[in-house]
Amino acid sequence: MIDSLEDNLKSEVLKNIYGKILSSKKLFKLNFNVENLAIIVKEKTVGVHEYVYKEGDLGDNIFFLLRGSLEIVKSQTNTIL
């Protein structure tokens, strides 16, 4: 729905939604331009048994868990960390 908005309105909506969330965290508030960061945030819904990352993948994203839980599994030993 947000993607269908005009660019200026889309930026304002993203700043309002994600800017508030990011500003509430000291790490982001002190180290980043929260408004610039807020307009590039993308939500991703991951289902049961889906992977966010697999061991060995290049890590060019950062994910925050808003609700639910996840497991971290070391693939060679199938160990849950």
Image (cartoon, rainbow, N blue to C red):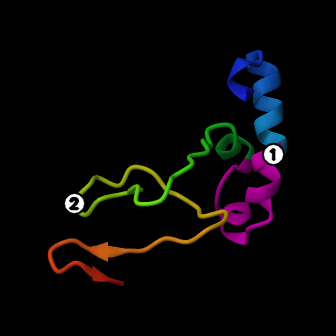
Q: Is residue 79 left or right of residue 9?
A: left
Q: N-terminal of the two: label 1 or label 2?
A: 1
Q: Secondary structure at mark 1?
A: helix
Q: Mark 1 and mark 2 in contact? Answer it, CB < 8 Å.
A: no
Q: Secondary structure at mark 2?
A: loop
Q: Residues within 10 Å of mark 1 (few under 14, many from 20)?
A: few
Which residue shows up at 21% across the image and 71% down it?
75
Q: Is residue 81 left or right of residue 30?
A: left
In front of the other: 25 or 53? 53
Residue located beneath label 2 in the image: 56
Depicted 21 relative to depicted 77: above or below: above
Which residue shows up at 62% across the image and 43% down it?
41
Q: Tell me which corner region of the image, top left, top right, bottom left or bottom right, holds residue 11.
A: top right
Residue located beneath label 1 in the image: 17
Q: Tell me which corner region of the image, top left, top right, bottom left or bottom right, holds residue 12.
A: top right
Could you say where residue 17 lies in the image, as x and y percent from the top left? 81, 45
Q: Is residue 10 left or right of residue 46?
A: right
- Magenta stretch? 17-34
